[in-house]
Image (cartoon, rainbow, N blue to C red):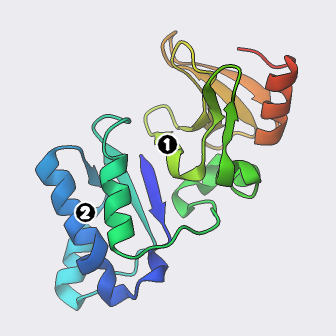
């Protein structure tokens, strides 16, 4: 699940027609994914002509497909990138340290490994079944770096080896510092 925030940049009466409705239709038509709770939003739009949601939760059939399409719809609707804020949907992940840091804006690309260790806020994804919010990866064995629902700190999620979790650090910055110093490993 990915989250698009900042819908409050559009008046409630324009959110459905300029972004949500066309995006929902294209995601359905293409088979790339869906907007969660779209039926309730469609009912509101049909009843009142507006929707009050400030965020959209999107589920893609495959994590690597659909982001480009969504980004095009967001740009066409006139939404400007804002400083990242913790989406309401993800507040129970205790991830404010990441969303309030420059890591959410710039991410961190490890030149020597040619790998994004920490991604930008636009690339953060939630694995609903595992209750895991992934903000990065070491680039090997399907391991993700991120937050567990209701748990403090940063974890490695070893989804390919029995879905095990490994505690890594208290904050995203401490994870990055420890990883680069070699004191944190998976």
Residue 119 versus residue 138 in the image, above or below:
below
Residue annotated with mark 1 = 125
Q: Residue furthest front?
A: 111
Q: Quadrant of residue 38?
A: bottom left
Q: x, y (%) of residue 25?
A: 16, 61
Count of numbered tags = 2
Answer whether labels 1 and 2 touch (C-beta < 8 Å): no
Task: Determine the secondary structure under disc 1.
Answer: strand
- Residue found at x 63% / y 62%: 84
Q: Give the class, few, some or many, for how many residues have Cα within 10 Å of label 1's Cα (few <14, many ≥20).
A: many
- The residue beneath circle 2 is 23
**Image position, residue 95 (x, y; %):** 69, 49
Q: Quadrant of residue 37?
A: bottom left
Left or right, 163 with reference to 153: left
Nearest the viewer among 132 and 5 is 5
Q: Is residue 78 visible?
A: yes
């Amino acid at each position: 699940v990915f989250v698009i925030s900042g819908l409050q940049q559009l008046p409630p009466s324009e959110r459905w027609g300029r972004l949500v409705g066309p995006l929902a239709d294209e995601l359905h038509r293409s088979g790339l994914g869906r907007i969660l709770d779209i039926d309730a939003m469609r009912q509101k739009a049909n009843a009142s002509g507006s929707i009050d949601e400030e965020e959209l939760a999107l589920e893609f059939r495959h994590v690597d497909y659909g982001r480009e399409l969504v980004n095009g719809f967001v740009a066409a609707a006139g939404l400007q990138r804002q400083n990242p804020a913790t989406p309401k949907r993800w507040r129970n992940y205790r991830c404010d340290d990441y969303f309030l840091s420059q890591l959410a804006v710039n991410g961190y690309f490890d030149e020597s490994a040619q790998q994004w260790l920490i991604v930008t806020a636009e690339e953060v994804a939630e694995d609903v079944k595992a209750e895991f919010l992934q903000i990065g990866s070491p680039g090997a064995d399907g391991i993700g770096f991120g937050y567990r629902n209701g748990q403090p700190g940063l974890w490695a999620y070893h989804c390919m080896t029995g879905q095990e979790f490994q505690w890594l650090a208290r904050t995203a910055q401490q994870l990055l510092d420890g990883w680069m110093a070699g004191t944190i490993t998976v």
